[in-house]
Amino acid sequence: MPDPLASARTRTPASTTSAPSSRALLVEGLRRHKAGQVREALALYRRAVILDPGLTDGWHMLGAASLQQGDAEAALAPLERSRHLAPRDALLQANLAHAWRALGCHAEAAAALATAIALDPARAEPWQDLGLMAAERGLRHDAERCLAHAAHLRPEPGALVRHANALLALGRRDRAENRLGIALRLTPDHLGARLARAGARRALGDIDGALADARAAVALSPNAPGPAGALGTAHLHGGRLPEAIRWRGRAARLAPAKGTSWLDLGQAAIAVGPGESAATALKRAVAADPALPAAYDALAEVRRRQGQWAAARRLLDWRLRLAPDPAVSLRRALHLPVMPESEAALDAAHERLLADLDALETDATPRGPNADPLAALAVSPDALEGHGRDTAAVMSRVAQVARGLCPGLTHTARLAAAPLADAPLRLVVLLPPEDPAPQDSLAPLAARLSPDLAARPDLSVTVLRPPGAPSIIATDPASAAGATTPLPADLDQARAMIADLRPDGLLAVDPMASPLTWALVFGRLAPVQAMILGRPATSGIATLDYVLTAAAWHDAEAQRRHTERLIRLRGLPLRLPSAPPHASLRRADLGLPPPGEARLYLALADPGRFPPLHDRAWVDLLRRDTRGVLMLPGGPHRSLAQRLLDRWRRLEGGPAVLDRVRVLPSLRRPHLLGVARLADAVLDAPGAGAGATVMEAMTLGVPAVTLAGSPPGTGVVAGLYRHWGITDLVARDPVHFVNLALRLARHEDWRREIGARLAQAALDPDAGAAVAAEIALFFRVAREAAAEGRRLTAWPGDDA
């Protein structure tokens, strides 16, 4: 709020007929006000204006003091009275705007600030206040324009920081960092500038710079929660999770009554895994601020990932009671059970999902164009993939409801004209965030095709990737997607970046892994739009024209399970690493029995994705091999693994074998591959969907038993075996799966012979270039079809 005291003390009174006693009361009130005795000053101002109703400064100061006391309603009448007496007082207009703004009357506040600017255009404060108010209302471009002008009129550090924050909200990180650099040159120990620049550098990927600024902020204010939280955030984005939790924990302890501090700590703990430490912090956030919606959202996601589906829905119900929001209602509908108890529970969950979607379609809640698409799409529907239901029908409904809730999802860019016959095709490759998905996604292997595509002379390729949070799961350094350009976090800015490229085609890798990429493919950004390795395998989105898959993965019948046209390539739309890094481990390192005492089986899949349909097979495996020990991935999935064991315990014979199940600790990818090399048999869990780890293990000559087509269209490992002509370990049914697992574990020579064949097949140096050539040909042919207003209906791989 502008300081009315200095102005009231120095300007000539607007009322020249004031009685001496009223002027004396005003002067005494100003003295008390300056001394911090606001209540006494208010009484003196009231007496002054009673004695002289024309005392402009008296009415002004009465309103300003009421506003300072937090009583905007009481401030409004005296400020309006003062404005009537002095309509050309710019400071008065600015204070009146503050009163209107505090009452939530944004239009009246904006009008008062516009009047203040017109009366005194060289004064920075009204521009600043107008910009801050625009930022509160989500008008980011207007906010940036006003705050830029305020900083131009008064280039002091605080104004530069406010302008930089507005630039950051628009994704203009380079300009923001530049403004903050100027602020720090003016005042090197400016805390706000240090904190803001730490955020800008973090957004630019300069983690070391962000850490340096955050540490400097902590040195400036060691006992303030803001700098500690900023340092924790910088460590989080640098993948240093223990340090992130340490500093965010310090911030929470420094401000225990601040719900957002506990929320930040809980979100850092979630990066380690959805355990009780995350839940505890998030419950503290709710206790500190019961009206903090994001805390309920985060706690609901923890409970869902722990398999506590009912608890997750209850939390979202409480969240919706705080503030009805159709976008949150869609997220609630998509909170499918990660760990279903039975096939009947799956049926019930899908019936509930369809009922929720019906309710959302008929909901009369006003929506409007400002409903946030990224908030609505914050929960991935990937849990549908392992449920074996009619995913195409469900995803079509999800897409339809999302468009209804968020009209902003509908977007058509100005499309490029058809290229000349000999001109390179402009292709945008849209990658998911850099952190691996919780289900050990195959997307990083598809991303490795980007350099092969970029090397083609008939393509001009731009690879884009949204910002993402770090993960404790290490990725293969050799799996880099080549040169990538970061997408702005803002949907409109990301669309504009793609539109400026005028692409002929857009290829999205697992687009539903991120709210931003999911929202982008709802729009028409290129004449031809396709995806690879989506989770679910179909999107239900009309603007996604094609799914690129492999003929070895999907048969012709798979088309009915997709809303997109299925393009069955002859090659695999991914690139396997030739020698993924792996640790050399011994059984003793993991507390496992020596080879003579136990046979080790490793199930490489997220325990939350084991379908109940195949529970019997796991119990039978351990019943038939009394020396068998089954290892399950733990770490962030430990709570789900325990719930899986509870499910098996209810089966006949289950309690007798569960003492031979080991839940592994949290392991980085090289160490998990090291465990795979230790195992006597690696198992691609039926129905769980293979991840990158099991396929990378196969390239190391580690064979894995798999089940063909369970559920239909997800036999990725079986398809890879068929592609290589090695089908020894592809089981026909769960009983055959158990038989193959037992044989693989017991016959070392057979295991080595298959492993040698796998390692040899994986050494195809031309595989990436060959599939890149087929993808380039597809986009060329599909672009010609799009120019004629049609889609492709056939592809040579259909005959494979």
Image: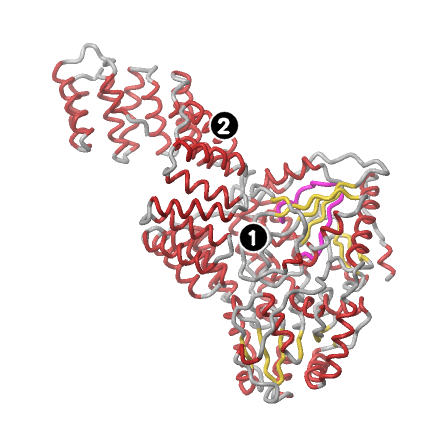
Q: Is residue 525 left or right of residue 632?
A: right
Closest to the observer, 304 or 580 = 580
Label 2 Cα crowd, 10 Å radius (few <14 / some 14-19 / many 20+): some
Mark 1 and mark 2 lie on one chain; the one further toward the N terminus is: 2
- Residue extending furthest top? 16
Range of residues picked out in magenta = 517-534
Closest to the observer, 788 or 105 = 788
Amino acid type of the residue that numbered disc 2 sits on in the rendered structure: Arg
Rendered residue at 74%/71% (across/down): 708
64 lies above or below 698: above
Amino acid type of the residue that numbered disc 1 sits on in the rendered structure: Ala
617 lies above or below 73: below
Q: Position of residue 787 (x, y in %)?
A: 82, 39
Q: How many marks?
A: 2
The residue carrying mark 1 is 359
The residue carrying mark 2 is 145
Select label 1 or label 2 by which is in front: 2
Q: Quadrant of residue 707?
A: bottom right
